[in-house]
């Protein structure tokens, strides 16, 4: 014990000497292990980070799925193009005398033996086209006018030149296409007037100008001398229109001192011929009128005529411009624009001007009695201007043989009209509307058809391959049919024929005592009724007897 006294007395220092190195050992040992684990984890993270994509590498899976989606979109677009062409063909009709010889290919070569019958029937086609507008018939034809007369058709419809020596296949196509386009415009006029019975009630009552144009698609700012309304009037300007008249819509619209405008401002240069094409286009006729009226420049060099607007070979459609000048109820102008836009073929109105009705005979208060009902050019009223003098310029419907497009058909609905046609122009709400628009006609979608057929074949091949890899599971009916084929029985198995399930085989059979304890399936549990004393002490009351009998019957009834 005495030997332990020094140790006991110095135990603090002894323990302190042991704790310090042990603590240092534990600290450095743990710190080393932690550092080793940290370095190992950092190395793993660096390895993982180096394997992460920077986002610039192509994602093949995404590319495949995106190409699949784009393929379906392309099929849908091609299908829509084909459907547009099929819908367009409903209106691409030909006269019966040539229909059998028209090639199925759009703009295909038409046989020569079908061109001469078309030339002979062309005048009848133009007459049918005029009657499509439901025009007011002249006085001498009132007895044969079987239609409701709703429109004064003073305009010269676009016509092609039908030479006796023959026409080319392309000229025949162009002439018939223009008939289709004018039919669209005529149908819009008919729809706006469909609930009216005569010109005195009609919404659109007069058509003074209806022309078809092409162009380079680059609008000409400022217009040209040959096509402007001012040059036709000798440089005078028309008066300001009613301040209350509506405006707006299309690419540009509004109040204009000159109601008419140059179509080149909408369709571009190069489309001066307002018809299907011929040797006597509008550029020549307008310069002739300008020289006679003191305006224009008759020495201008002729410009090559463009039939369509900005036509390119690879474009899937053709666009043809139209210009109309009509007399219409000013409140119904939006309805007429909507009817044009709702045509069977795409039609859009690019520009329109609104002005006073120049055909009104009554002189409004505060207006000049001269010229166009106060429009400023003395002696130039439409009704007073001698129609025979116009015929000297060879304009269709005005007395001579050649129309604007070189055709020889005369418009019989422009002159000699009954008095009610002039009286119908005096309504105070009638205004002059000049508008220009574009009609779109689709080319035959040969490329779209081929792409659609190829895509459908690829889809069918992929579907067949998928079906071969993953056969469909047989349905319940297929299983029954296979069992019937194997057993030679067509009847469905009865309940007794259905074998017991696997679970039934594991249930032990019942003993005799258990079977006796189980009641039969059709057993009925008896219910004791409370005893009721008979009415006379011997018999059961009739009502209670019947009730008991009914309860018993209900209980045993399955």
Image (cartoon, rainbow, N blue to C red):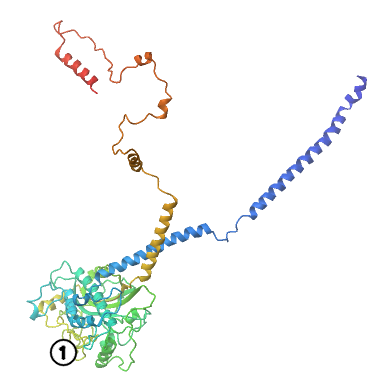
Q: Nearer the viewer, residue 222 or 7?
A: 7
View extreme (bottom): residue: 299
Determine the residue positioned at 66% across, 52% down: 47
Name above or below for residue 384 compared with residue 425.
below
Query: Within the image, what quadrant is residue 195 found in?
Result: bottom left
Instruction: Give the residue drawn at x 39%, y 18%.
Output: 510
Q: In which quarter of the image is residue 191?
A: bottom left
Q: Position of residue 243 (x, y in %)?
A: 26, 74
Rendering coords of residue 202 (x, y %): 16, 71
Q: Which of 312 and 497 is in front in this view?
A: 497
Of 219 and 168, nearer the camera is 168
- What residue would you read off at disc 1? 388
Residue 273 in the image: x percent, y percent? 29, 84
Q: Quadrant of residue 58?
A: bottom right
Residue drawn 33% across the image and 38% down it: 487
Quadrant of image for the N terminus: top right
Residue at disc 1, secondary structure: helix
């Amino acid at each position: 014990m005495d030997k332990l006294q020094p140790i006991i007395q110095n135990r603090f220092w002894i323990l302190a000497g042991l704790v310090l190195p042990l603590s240092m050992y534990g600290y450095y040992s743990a710190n080393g292990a932690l550092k080793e684990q940290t370095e190992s984890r950092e190395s793993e993270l660096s390895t993982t980070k180096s394997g992460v994509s920077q986002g610039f590498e192509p994602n093949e899976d995404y590319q495949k799925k995106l190409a699949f989606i784009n393929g379906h979109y392309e099929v849908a677009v091609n299908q829509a193009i084909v459907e547009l062409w099929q819908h367009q063909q409903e209106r691409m009709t030909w006269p019966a005398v040539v229909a059998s010889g028209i090639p199925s290919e759009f703009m295909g070569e038409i046989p020569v033996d079908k061109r001469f019958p078309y030339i002979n029937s062309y005048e009848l086609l133009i007459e049918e086209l005029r009657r499509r507008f439901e025009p007011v018939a002249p006085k001498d034809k009132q007895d044969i006018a079987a239609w409701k007369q709703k429109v004064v058709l003073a305009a010269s419809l676009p016509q092609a030149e039908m030479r006796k020596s023959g026409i080319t296949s392309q000229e025949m196509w162009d002439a018939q296409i223009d008939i289709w386009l004018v039919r669209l415009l005529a149908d819009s006029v008919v729809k706006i007037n469909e609930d009216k019975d005569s010109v005195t009630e009609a919404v659109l009552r007069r058509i003074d100008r209806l022309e078809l144009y092409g162009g380079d698609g680059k609008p000409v700012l400022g217009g040209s001398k040959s096509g402007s309304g001012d040059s036709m009037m000798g440089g005078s300007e028309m008066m300001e229109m009613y301040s209350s008249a509506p405006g707006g819509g299309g690419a540009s619209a509004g109040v204009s001192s000159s109601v008419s405008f140059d179509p080149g401002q909408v369709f571009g240069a190069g489309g001066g011929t307002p018809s299907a094409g011929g040797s006597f286009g509008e550029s020549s006729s307008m310069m002739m009128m300008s020289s006679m009226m003191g305006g224009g420049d008759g020495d201008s060099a002729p410009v090559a005529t463009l039939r369509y607007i900005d036509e390119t070979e690879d474009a899937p459609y053709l666009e043809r411009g139209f210009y109309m000048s009509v007399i219409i109820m000013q409140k119904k102008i939006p309805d007429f624009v909507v009817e044009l836009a709702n045509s069977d073929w795409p039609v859009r109105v690019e520009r329109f001007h609104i002005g006073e009705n120049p055909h009104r005979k009554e002189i409004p208060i505060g207006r000049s009695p001269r010229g166009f009902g106060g429009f400023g050019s003395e002696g130039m009223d439409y009704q007073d201007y001698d129609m025979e003098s116009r015929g000297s310029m060879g304009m269709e419907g005005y007395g001579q043989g050649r129309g604007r497009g070189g055709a020889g058909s005369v418009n019989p609905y422009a002159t000699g009209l009954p008095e009610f046609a002039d009286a119908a122009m005096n309504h105070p709400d009638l205004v002059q509307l000049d508008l220009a628009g574009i009609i779109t006609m689709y080319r035959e979608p040969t490329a779209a058809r081929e792409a659609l057929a190829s895509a459908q074949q690829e889809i069918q091949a992929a579907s067949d391959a998928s079906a071969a890899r993953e056969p469909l599971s047989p349905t319940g009916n297929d299983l029954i049919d296979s069992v019937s084929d194997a057993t030679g029985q067509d009847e469905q198995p009865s309940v007794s024929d259905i074998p017991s399930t696997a679970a039934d085989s594991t249930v032990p059979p019942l003993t005799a005592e258990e079977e006796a304890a189980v009641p039969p399936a059709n057993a009925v549990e008896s219910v004791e009724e409370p005893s009721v004393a008979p009415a006379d002490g011997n018999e059961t009351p009739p009502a209670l007897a019947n009730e008991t009998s009914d309860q018993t019957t209900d209980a045993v009834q399955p």
